[in-house]
Image (spheres, rainbow, N blue to C red):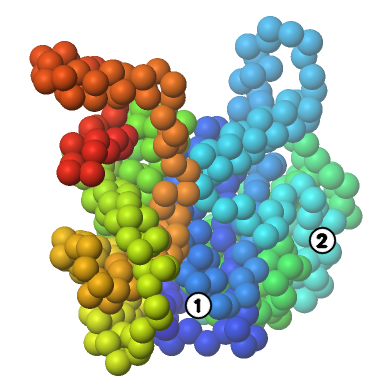
Amino acid sequence: MKIYNSLSRTKEEFKPIRADEVGMYVCGPTVYDEPHIGHARSAYIFDVIRRYFQYKKYKVTFIRNVTDVDDKIIDKARKGLAKGGGPAPSLEDACREVAEKYLGAYHMDMDALGISRPDKEPRATEYIKKMIVFIKGLIDSGKAYESGGDVYFDIKKARGYGKLSNQNLNKMESGARISPGEKKKDALDFALWKAAKEGEPSWSSEWGPGRPGWHIECSVMSSDILGDEFDIHGGGIDLIFPHHENEIAQSEGAGKAFARCWIHNGLLTINNEKMAKSLGNYITIKDFIARHKDADLLKLLFLSTHYRHPVDYTGEKIEEMKKVKERIDIFLRSVNEALEKFEGTYKTKPAIELQEYFITSLEDINIQKENFEKAMDDDFNAPQAMAEIFNIIHSGNLVKMSFNDCDNDRIRYVKLKRARDIVSNLINIFGLFSHEQGKTLQPTEERLINDRNHFRNIKDYTKADELRRILLNDYGIILEDTKDGTKSRRKI
């Protein structure tokens, strides 16, 4: 398996620190607003990476943090207090309410998308004491300094600063400025601890009351849970600088080896524009689910582009994804029906020797499965992997079309079942069909289907066609008349 490492800017062979184990740390949400579909892309990509490692029989420890104290949370709480409308809590209480509200929203949306929860989800506020100890160690070693109640990391003490973002320190310094109120030595020095402002959440420290800077939490949490060196650190490409660059500086400054491999996903645009509320193109995860009723359509859009590349969201592409999903859905349904039809026949037949035919019969499907794995082993190339899934579907469809009632269909039965099982297994890596909605027909729907079939049987095609249109337009149910009777499926 080879993974593109943002630190070396090359594909590297993946060699875990501990055999058959993977430690992953991914930057999670700052909980101050409803999650949008850009957040969904990052969360989904790393869920797929985790699932693929598990498919490869690795034991994965997946950590995703929560930033529950931050300037944005404080600003949101202030605005809420300014609106009034009830007993006014303190700003500290209001911040806590904001964080809890939007962390709950994040969890609900991830569940709606069928994205697995992390093994551990540490919150910044749970790690304040350990952050203080970490910061004190940096001060004692001369890597950081206190200034007016703030504590800054001394960027001049960082070896190789800029190596992740591939930036030159001298050029960065030439464009950097010290903001009013900051008391740091160098414009690039970054805050490890922020002195408390009136009313804001704060914790006691030897430098006075305050709260941690943003970057310090990830260094402390990751090393505490995964160790001073771990396999993979992930996040969006927008976090490379300054967040991840600063994580490396402070962790290495504390004598930790930190992350071996850095994985960064590309960002999402809407109709080739940056998503922003001011542009009116801001789509929350709730908005998407409410409109399309199917999280798989968003996942399939993400799978259509390599994770390191940007992906553009358009309404037309979502319509295309409906057709993509429908191909998978029709295959699985039709194969299950075919297998069910012939299963009883083969169970009652005497056992025959299939071994000499088995390898030849399944050769193309097994090769396609291996090609899927080769694609995923090559830096998680999901678009190519999806193409191999459709190659297996094509092979399965060819077998299904040649099915008949003769004894020679035993080999075809084995092959078709193998195709179905492989497709089901592989799409599970992508978390597809994990949240199917409305598969069971409702009583009203069953009655309309029965009525339609009645009119069709008595050759009243006008009424039969009218009920068929009602089922499609009002209930989203497609009817397919076959020699074995009428089949129904939901429109995707």
Pointer 2 or 1: first along the chain: 1
Q: What's the CA distance linking mark 2 and mark 1? A: 35 Å
Q: Mark 2 points at which residue?
A: 130
Label 1 environment density (alpha carbons within 10 Å; few <14, some 14–19, many ≥20): few
| Residue 231 visible within the image | no
Nearest the eye: 219 or 71: 219
Q: Where is residue 364 in the image (x, y as percent from the top left)?
A: 23, 80
* Marker disc for residue 56: 1
| Residue 103 visible within the image | yes
Q: Position of residue 303 (x, y in %)?
A: 32, 57
Left or right, 344 with respect to 451, comes to: right
Instruction: Work out whether 26 lies above or below 364.
Output: above
Frontmost of labels 2 and 1 is: 1
Q: Do the residues labelled 2 and 1 touch (CB within 8 Å)?
A: no
Q: Position of residue 120 (x, y in %)?
A: 70, 58
Left or right, 214 with respect to 460, comes to: right
Q: What residue type is disc 1 on?
A: Lys
Nearest the eye: 45 or 394: 394
Q: What residue type is disc 2 on?
A: Lys
Q: Where is residue 108 in the image (x, y as percent from the top left)?
A: 58, 37
Quarter of the rendering occupied by the N terminus: bottom left
Q: For numbered disc 2, what is the local secondary structure?
A: helix
Label 2 environment density (alpha carbons within 10 Å; few <14, some 14–19, many ≥20): some
Instruction: Work out whether 460 lies above or below 101.
Output: above
Instruction: Work out whether 193 lies above or below 477.
Output: below
Residue under the point 61% across and 27% down? 76
Residue under the point 44% across and 41% down? 436
